Structures are given as C-alpha cells and as structure tokens.
C-alpha cells in the first residue's frame, strides 16, 4: 500500500505568528515521527516558508512546500519566485496549477508543464493540481478534461521523472466556501481514469476539495486515492491532526 500524503495549503491565510504557532504545535504533537504510513506536508504562503521550516526543523518528517514557482531560475519577472529561491527558503514541494491560479493568474497547461520541468530539474517534488469546472462535469467530460490537463503538464517526462510527481485532483466545484463536498460516487470515475493512467507511475494521486473530518475516511477508501490535499479543515491544527489520525488508521487496515 502506498504512503498516504496528507497535506494542507494555507492559501493566502495566516500571519507569521499564526504560522509559527501552527507549526510549533504540529512539531510538538508529532515528536519527530510521522504517523505510520503517512507523509505529512504543509504549504504555507511564501512569507512564512522559511519560518515554518525552521520551526519544524531540518529532520522533520513533515515536507514543506510553496504554492507556486516560476519556470525560469532568475531574471526580470517582478513579483515572481523561482524554484531555486523556493528551495533556498527550505521548500521540498512546489504546488503547480491550482485552479485558483488557473482562474485568476493565467496559469495554463503550458505554464504548468514548464513549472513541472523546472521543479524536477532542481530536485523538488511537483504537486500538480488538476480539476474540472461544474460545466465540464455536467457535460460528462470530467475524466477526459483532467487527463488532458495532466498529460499536458507531464508531457515528455521520463519514467523516472514521472515517478517523482504527485498529482492532486481537485474538482473546482468542490473547492472552498463556494464549493460543495463531492460524493464518493462522483469521484469513482475520475479516479478510475487517473488510476489507469498514473497508478504505479507517480508518487501519489491525492484528492482535494472540501475534505473534512466526516468525509476523509470514505475519500481515502476510493480506489487509487493515495492522499488528501486540504484547505480549510487543516488550517486549525486540531483539524489537521485529526486528518493525520484518520489516515494512519486507514493505512493500518
Ligand atoms: P478546501 O479544503 O478549503 O476546499 O480547499 C481545497 C484546496 O484547494 C486545497 O488546495
């Protein structure tokens, strides 16, 4: 059974103090050991990356990430952060192509492909987010759409490079306050398609979108799901710790 990746992006939330407090409590609760069968990860905002990394410590079992990075290593790209800079700040994971970035910041299949490539080139883990709109879902096109997003971003990778990629399927209609939790039934087909294409070839295939303490266990039971990528429920540390316990229990089955 694959290790279950259970992580959170803080999106644009938390001050430095709030971020440090969250990380300190996580560090103290874990005591230097990840729950059995679970790979925890946290993706703060850029300003908190280094601080969170320092609080967690160099030998932490919790992986640290950034929510975006540019495909160029350096240059005149005002407002952007490069993969080497993210690495310098302590990041091990680069989140790429979240639907909020596709919707509001012009992320495309082409930019996600370049960012995946830059991330791998510098030895970090790309966390590629894919997901369809309600319109696409209602037209019955979910699986085809997400397979196209993934194939476009992962085009040209060797088997070894692909094996370092983590995919997060996050249907847009299920994300955030305006979203609604997906039912298990709605996720069977997209995960069957992703599983057929990527199980055994990538590090993991995560689910994200309104994950909460009531649905986490059943989401983990869906075939081909090997982790959860969580927003709101994990922003309070208690919620995140509970998700880790649910995953640990699932891994022990
Ligand atoms: P929510 O869990 O708040 O719906 O957010 C999911 C998400 O977008 C994680 O990246």
Image (cartoon, grey):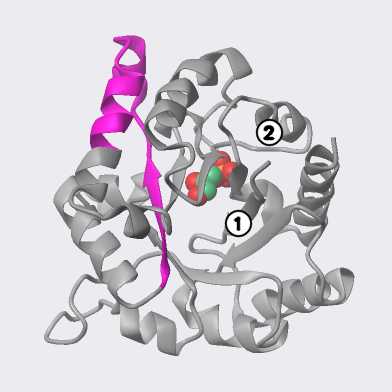
69 relative position to 216: left or right:
left
**Badge 2: residue crowd in 10 Å (few <14, some 14–19, many ≥20):** many
Q: Quadrant of the N terminus?
A: top right
For marks 1 and 2, the one nearer the N-term is 1
The residue labelled by disc 1 is 8
Whether disc 1's CB lies below 8 Å from ligand 1 is answered yes
Cα–Cα span, label 1 and label 2: 16 Å
Q: Is residue 87 visible?
A: yes
Q: Is residue 214 above or below residue 42?
A: above
For label 1, the SS is strand
For label 2, the SS is helix
Q: Is residue 231 magenta?
A: no
**Quadrant where ligand 1 appears:** top right
Residue range highlighted in magenta: 124-149
125 relative position to 31: left or right:
left
Q: Quadrant of the C terminus?
A: top right
């Amino acid at each position: 059974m694959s290790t279950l990746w259970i992580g959170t992006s803080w999106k644009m939330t938390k001050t430095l103090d709030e971020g440090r407090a969250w990380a300190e409590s996580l560090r103290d609760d874990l005591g230097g050991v990840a729950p059995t069968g679970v790979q925890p990860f946290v993706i703060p905002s850029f300003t908190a990356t280094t601080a969170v990394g320092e609080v967690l410590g160099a030998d932490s079992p919790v992986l640290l990430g950034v929510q975006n990075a540019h495909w160029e290593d350096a240059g005149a790209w005002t407002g952007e952060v490069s993969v080497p800079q993210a690495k310098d700040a302590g990041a091990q994971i680069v989140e790429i192509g979240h639907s909020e970035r596709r919707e509001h910041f012009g992320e495309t299949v082409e930019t996600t492909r370049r960012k995946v490539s830059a991330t791998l080139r510098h030895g970090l883990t790309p966390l590629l987010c894919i997901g369809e709109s309600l319109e696409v879902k209602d037209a019955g096109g979910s699986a085809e759409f997400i397979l196209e997003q993934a194939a476009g971003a992962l085009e040209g990778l060797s088997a070894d490079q692909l094996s370092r990629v983590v995919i997060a399927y996050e249907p847009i209609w299920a994300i955030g306050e305006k979203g609604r939790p997906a039912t298990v039934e709605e996720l069977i087909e997209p995960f069957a398609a992703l599983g057929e294409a990527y199980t055994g070839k990538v590090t993991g295939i995560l689910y994200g979108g309104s994950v909460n303490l009531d649905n986490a266990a059943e989401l983990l039971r869906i075939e081909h799901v090997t982790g959860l990528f969580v927003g709101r429920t994990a922003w309070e540390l208690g919620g995140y710790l509970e998700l880790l316990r649910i995953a640990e229990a699932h891994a022990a089955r």
